[in-house]
């Protein structure tokens, strides 16, 4: 009887162990199930590279290029801001800050990671957006730039904490060797520690960018949501994620629009899958 | 030639500046929210339903909705997540399957939140015909926080020294008895920490509940798991972008309640982790 009970429990544990694989597969399957139907009416190349997104006009135009460019522009802007600041502060926290200050800084970064994106979106709306409008004398502050700044902020906790791990896990003997040879602490950091931790730092940057591409609420609240191809970073844009969030509520289940939004979901899933698998490879390279 | 000591000072100054650029705004955000939100908080705001098209009254249904959703998510995710962590830490071998599971967890953690929303819509709302309901929303949020719970629980289980298991096994306990009576009790605070962090995450997420449960305006409280519900993060989104002329005080009050809820859970988790580390016997 005891053996039997144990057998059941172990099988249950195995099944739950497989749950993660099951859920990833289910997510992908259901995205495909609902999303692929759009390609009965639109060819994939037209969907990906079509320049106009008018899902409810007759006939519907379902080209997501403006949305892809919107996502890329906002992500690029966020990357430019968050990578240098994030890596710099990871180095500061793990190498330079005194122990007490280090704990406070880490708590601050953890705090930032915990703030819900809709709250950051709200704060962006009431502070950042008016600033951007006034500084650049624009008709509206709801621009790609505002989105980039806010998203940079949201990528920071990911970049800092993973890059800090990478810097921290560089063997102490490397550092001691460099210092013993007469290098200053700073020379040691940028000649020895940064190159040695580079694959982990790269993974940190990629995961930060992954966070940015997938971010939805804040971006929807402050980028203005205009599905046009932007010419500058000071124009409103609409991202892939914001399109889904803003339009799914109105799309009729089973309509072309509904299928198209799921197809956008497939694009997002594939992007995040690629980023996470690659980042994981970099992290494993470090540990082996 | 440049003075290396001087360039070090300059470099360190910039590194410090970069860190301030992150930490100072975070502090400012929290201070502003508290300062502008406090005046809105009173008994009526916390216990009344929204009135006059959400321009006055309180946020009670949204608070209750969020609590239901978070509890539902954890009821679903904790058992699966914990057993999955037990598998990874106690049973799995270093093989292809284990690598796949780990990769799946990493990916699950990286799936954009709005894609979870789509998935919940397709699977729970449409396919299983649960409709837009607390059940659909909780399950969607539950899958979303699964990786957080698995990762934290696994770390907690793996930090229990191997000798504990060996002693128990050598005394004749079976593998499951060892896990049940030796490993789990010693890992419990780590597991709880991870669970609370997951709760905090679930409480603050908006995109996964957009199409699976969230109601724009629903003054009465949900009666069953098949009812729609209001939720704090979605309510905040609605009153700050969808409804014009909402008093700033109400918006900030809602932000403050949501932030307090989320940060409180994080604080509890951090304190537990800290005390656990101090108390550790090994």
Image: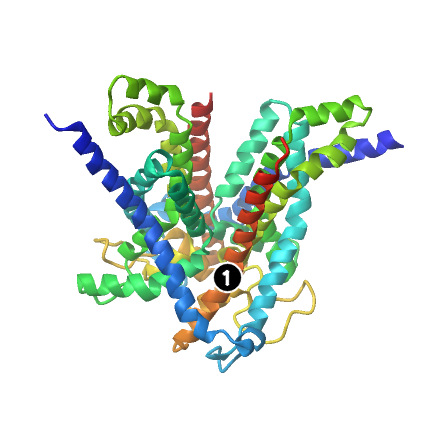
Q: Give the colour scheme shown.
A: rainbow
Q: Is residue A257 visible?
A: yes
Q: Residue at x 58, y 75 (%)?
A: B47
Quarter of the picture holding the N terminus of chain A: top right
Query: Closest to the observer: B262 or B98?
Result: B262
Quadrant in the rendering for residue B62: bottom right
How many labels were placed on the picture?
A: 1
> Could you tell whether B113 is left or right of A183 in the image?
right
Tell me where residue B163 appears, x and y as whole percent.
Answer: 68, 24
> Could you tell whether A228 is left or right of B270 in the image?
left
Q: Is residue A254 visible?
A: no
Q: Residue at x 78, y 32 (%)?
A: B177
- Outermost left residue: B1
> Could you tell whether A8 is left or right of A222 in the image?
right
- Outermost bottom residue: B52
Tell me where residue B254 appears, x and y as whole percent.
Answer: 48, 69
| Residue for badge 1 | B260
Query: Closest to the observer: A250 or A6?
Result: A6
Quadrant in the rendering for residue B168: top right
Counting other residues with Cα less than 10 Å from the Cα at mark 1, is it few (<14), some (14-19), or many (20 or more)?
some
Q: Chain of mark 1?
A: B
Instruction: Classify B238 as above or below A167.
Output: below
Tell me where residue A198 appears, x and y as whole percent.
Answer: 34, 28
Q: Residue at x 24, y 22 (%)?
A: A183
> Could you tell whether A77 is left or right of A102 in the image?
left
Q: Secondary structure at mark 1?
A: helix
Instruction: Classify A8 as above or below B233.
Output: above
Tell me where residue B111 appears, x and y as whole percent.
Answer: 49, 44
Query: Closest to the observer: B24 or B52?
Result: B24
């Amino acid at each position: 009887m005891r053996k039997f009970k144990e057998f059941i429990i172990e099988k249950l544990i195995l099944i739950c162990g497989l749950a993660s694989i099951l859920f990833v597969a289910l997510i992908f399957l259901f995205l495909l199930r609902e999303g692929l139907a759009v390609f009965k009416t639109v060819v994939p190349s037209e969907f990906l590279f079509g320049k106009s997104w008018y899902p409810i006009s007759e006939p519907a135009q379902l080209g997501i290029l403006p949305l892809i460019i919107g996502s890329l522009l906002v992500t690029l802007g966020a990357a430019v801001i968050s990578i240098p600041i994030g890596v710099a502060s990871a180095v500061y926290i793990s190498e330079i800050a005194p122990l007490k200050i280090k704990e406070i800084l880490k708590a601050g970064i953890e705090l930032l990671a915990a703030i819900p994106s809709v709250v950051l979106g709200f704060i962006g709306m009431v502070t950042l957006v008016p600033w951007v409008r006034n500084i650049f004398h624009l008709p509206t502050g709801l621009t790609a730039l505002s989105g980039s700044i806010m998203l940079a902020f949201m990528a920071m906790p990911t970049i800092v904490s993973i890059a800090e791990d990478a810097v921290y896990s560089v063997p102490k003997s490397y550092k001691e060797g460099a210092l013993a040879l007469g290098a200053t602490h700073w020379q040691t950091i940028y000649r020895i520690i940064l190159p040695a931790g580079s694959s982990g730092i790269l993974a940190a940057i990629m995961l930060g960018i992954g966070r940015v591409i997938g971010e939805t609420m804040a971006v929807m609240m402050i980028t203005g949501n205009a599905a046009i191809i932007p010419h500058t970073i000071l124009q409103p844009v609409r991202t892939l994620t914001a399109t889904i969030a803003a339009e799914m509520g109105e799309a009729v289940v089973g309509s072309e629009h509904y299928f198209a939004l799921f197809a956008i979901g497939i694009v997002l899933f594939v992007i995040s899958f690629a980023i996470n698998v690659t980042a994981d490879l970099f992290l494993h390279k470090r540990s082996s | 030639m440049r003075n290396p000591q001087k360039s070090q000072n300059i470099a360190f100054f910039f590194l410090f500046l970069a860190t301030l650029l992150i930490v100072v705004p975070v502090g400012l955000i929290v201070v502003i929210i508290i300062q502008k939100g406090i005046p809105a908080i009173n008994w009526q705001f916390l216990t009344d339903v929204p009135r006059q098209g959400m321009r006055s009254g309180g946020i009670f249904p949204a608070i209750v909705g969020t609590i239901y959703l978070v509890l539902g998510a954890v009821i679903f995710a904790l058992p699966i997540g914990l057993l999955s962590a037990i598998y990874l830490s106690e049973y799995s071998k270093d093989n292809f399957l284990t690598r796949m599971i780990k990769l799946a967890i990493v990916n699950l953690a990286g799936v954009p939140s709005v894609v979870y929303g789509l998935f919940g819509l397709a699977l729970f709302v449409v396919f299983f015909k649960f409709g837009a309901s607390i059940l659909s929303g909780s399950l969607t949020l539950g899958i979303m926080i699964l990786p957080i719970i698995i990762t934290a629980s696994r770390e907690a289980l793996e930090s229990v020294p191997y000798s504990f298991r060996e002693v128990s096994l050598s005394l004749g306990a079976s593998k499951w008895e060892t896990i049940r009576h030796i490993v789990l009790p010693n890992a419990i605070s780590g597991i709880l920490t991870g669970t609370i962090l997951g709760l905090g995450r679930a409480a603050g997420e908006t995109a996964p509940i957009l199409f699976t449960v969230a109601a724009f305006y629903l003054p009465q409280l949900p009666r069953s798991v098949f009812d729609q519900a209001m939720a704090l993060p979605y309510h905040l989104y609605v009153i700050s972008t969808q409804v014009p002329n909402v008093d700033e005080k109400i918006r900030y009050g809602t932000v403050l309640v949501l932030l307090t809820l989320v940060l409180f859970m994080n604080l509890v988790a951090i304190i537990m982790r800290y005390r656990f580390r101090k108390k550790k016997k090994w």
